[in-house]
Image: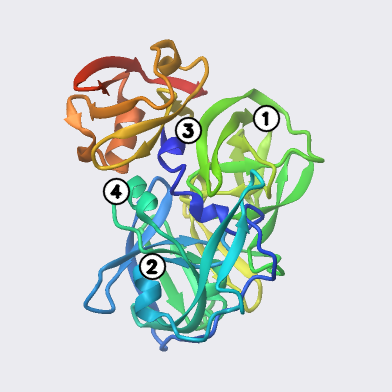
Amino acid sequence: MKRALLALAVLAGLLGGGCLGFRRAAPKPGLTHIGSKPVTLPGHVIGNVIVIEDKWDKFGPYHFVVDTGSSVTLVSPEIARRYGANGLAPSDEPRVRVRSPQGGYALLSAVTLEKFQLGGAVFEYVPALEYDCADLSTQFGVKIDGILGFPLFRNAVLTLDYPNERIILRPKIPDDGLQGEAILFDNADKIPLIPVRLGDREFAVLIDSGSGAAFDINPAGLSPDFVFGPVNGPLEATLSGDKPSRIGRLAGVLRIGSFDVPQPVAELTDDLSSIGGGILGHFTITFDQQDNEVFFQRDDTAPILVSPLRGTGLSFRKSPAYWKVAGVVPTSPAAAAGVSQGDLVTRVNGEPVSSWDPARYDELVASASSIEFSFIDGTSETRKAIDVAVLVP
């Protein structure tokens, strides 16, 4: 199930955008140097999230999640040690307390990166937080070295090119302009909020490229109608632990500028409403933070259809040797098969779990009628064939 696969990966979206809060204002980036030519960085779209790759020193290549929903940048301890500037932390406190949606807290070390580079784009004195990306790396199937928050690109024009799986950085908007439809956004909190409509109601949503979901909606003041659900969905991971989700298919049409998304699958949230990669992946999106404009470009003018949510009902915490069942959706095929939280899976369709990267497992869930899981109990394995069902039609 795609949402379950990205439960930890979407920690990218938990930082900033109302999902995690700081006790102080979001830090500002330092100097940015981009030449006259655009800087293009290749990447991969994994579970609707863009992961870019770059090698600027002998220790690379590095892989980063680009998260417009985050008001901070996170980097691995290795990068923090390698490029941290002594005595230039963004605050006098050696550690920063961050709050998760569940009300719990975690402490992350603050660091200022003396130099941070993406291709030919150089960022100096970048405030960041140090974060162990090991769980993210396991979930994405590639070593993740950090999460790049929206303020990093404050002095650059950032393009997320989902169709071509890349990002483009420019020093300014080209003289001949950009293709696409321009929408003004509110950038007061260093996160991009744009107006959308659902039926006859207009409200603000966060553009959250760190989320692989299609749409998260805060029902407060909106009382949205659903054509299905909401029902219990897979667990999602936060800094303070796992939380259950509620997912359904909305009635009405979500309108982003002139683009229509009829009856999108949506998850209920207590935080900011947001659009994630499940919808953003249909566009090439460019952010101009100087003029607070975002450009949505899409060659196809047909409505954007959000696919049904399929799955066995299992959520996992992954390691190379086994997948631990983090949650079981009630009334799902996995629940009917007697799978319990904490069970350990060593094989999928007879192959070791290490053979199943996120993209391959997503393809299996999207196409298979059932999946065989091998559960280990002591030294013995038990195989269970679990149906793949439509959890949200």
Horizontal and vertical percent for residue 144? 35, 59
Secondary structure, mark 3, is: loop
Q: Which numbered mark, 1 or 4, is in the foreground of this view?
A: 4
Tell me what residue is drawn at x 60 percent, y 29 percent. 249
Mark 2 belongs to which amino acid? Pro
Q: Which residue is mark 2?
A: 77
Q: Is residue 110 left or right of residue 377?
A: right
- Which mark is first along the chain, 3 or 4? 4
Q: Which numbered mark, 4 or 3, is in the foreground of this view?
A: 4
- Which mark is first along the chain, 3 or 1? 1
Spatial separation of the CA atoms under disc 3 and disc 2:
38 Å
Residue nearest the observer in this picture, 383 or 251: 383
- Which mark is first along the chain, 2 or 1? 2
| Picture disc at residue 280 | none
Mark 3 belongs to which amino acid? Ser
Tell me, yes or no, whether the two marked residues, 2 and 4, touch with CB atoms within 8 Å.
Answer: no
| Picture disc at residue 251 | 1
Horizontal and vertical percent for residue 317? 39, 38
Quadrant location of residue 344? Answer: top left
Spatial separation of the CA atoms under disc 1 and disc 3:
15 Å
Spatial separation of the CA atoms under disc 2 and disc 4:
19 Å
Question: Please, is residue 95 above or below residue 221 in the view?
Answer: below
Q: Which numbered mark, 2 or 4, is in the foreground of this view?
A: 2
Q: Which residue is mark 4?
A: 141
